[in-house]
Amino acid sequence: MHRKILAAAAAAATLLAPAAASAHVTLQPQEVAAGGFTRMDVRVPNERDDKGTTKVAVKMPPGFIFASYESYPGWTVEVEKRKLDKPVEMFGEEQTEEVDTITWTGDGERGIVKPGEFKDFGLSVGVPEGKPGSKLKFAATQSYEGGEVVRWIGPEDADEPAPLVTLKAAAGEHGGSDPTANATAIVEENDAAPAQTSGVSPDALDDKASKGLAIGALVVGALGLLVGIAGFSAARRRSA
């Protein structure tokens, strides 16, 4: 009897495991291009049935010099920075700080992630350079009504893993297309190629124009001859 109960409990735990794993705090998308600007969302699901999430804090990994946030009614945002060990040159300016922690704090009915809900907190960030395939760790804390705090800081296989984002090659690398290079190639090709009109080459157009002028001259000459003959005939009739 006890074995049957244990087996049923194990089966139930197995069925519930994927649902629990999907409810972790994550960063979306979970794969971003190194060295570029992109939008990222801190996705915060509520894992409790009787209380709401009222605060979320995310500690950024090294290298995030720029980060701006999307505002939401009922939520205030605080961005903390830390000094760089060595200043870096970006966009023609010397940067001496990088983003350390971003905290969203709810206030009132609109500043809460209720049971059964999730919320995406949007960020626009400059992703640091890095080797494709390497992972960035974003340690996070999630605070609930009543003072409970869940720390998402563990390894990937932990019950409370830290959100991870994998770096991929920047656009244009590993055979990727370079729009600027393609545009330059198109311009150079157009400059080198002779002008075309309706599929007829310039030489053919010149030939057609010359033939047209010759025919026109012949027609004008013939008309002049006819006019002259008519005038001569009229003059002889008058003299007669």
Image (spheres, rainbow, N blue to C red):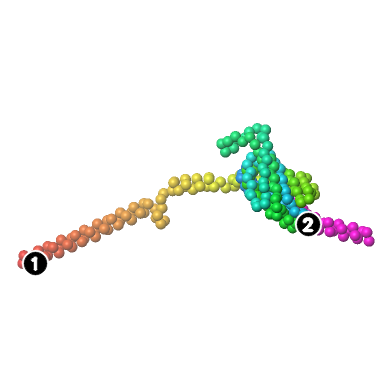
Towards the viewer: 133 or 185: 133
Closer to the observer: label 2 or label 1?
Answer: 2
- Residue 103: x, y in percent? 70, 45
Q: Are marks 2 and 1 in contact (CB under 8 Å)?
A: no
Towards the viewer: 105 or 157: 105
- Residue 161 visible in the snapshot: no
Q: Residue at x 59, y 45 (%)?
A: 172
Seen from this angle, which residue lies furthest front? 108
| Disc on the earlier residue, 2 or 1 | 2
Seen from this angle, which residue lies furthest right? 1
Say few, some or many: other residues with alpha carbon within 10 Å of mark 2 (under 14 / 14 to 19 / 20 or more): few
Residue 91 lies in the magenta stretch: no
- Residue 57 visible in the snapshot: yes
Between the residue at mark 2 and the residue at mark 1, the CA separation in whole angstroms equals 122 Å
Towards the viewer: 201 or 130: 130
Q: Name the residue under label 2.
A: 49
Which quadrant is the N terminus positioned in?
bottom right
Q: Element at badge 2?
A: loop
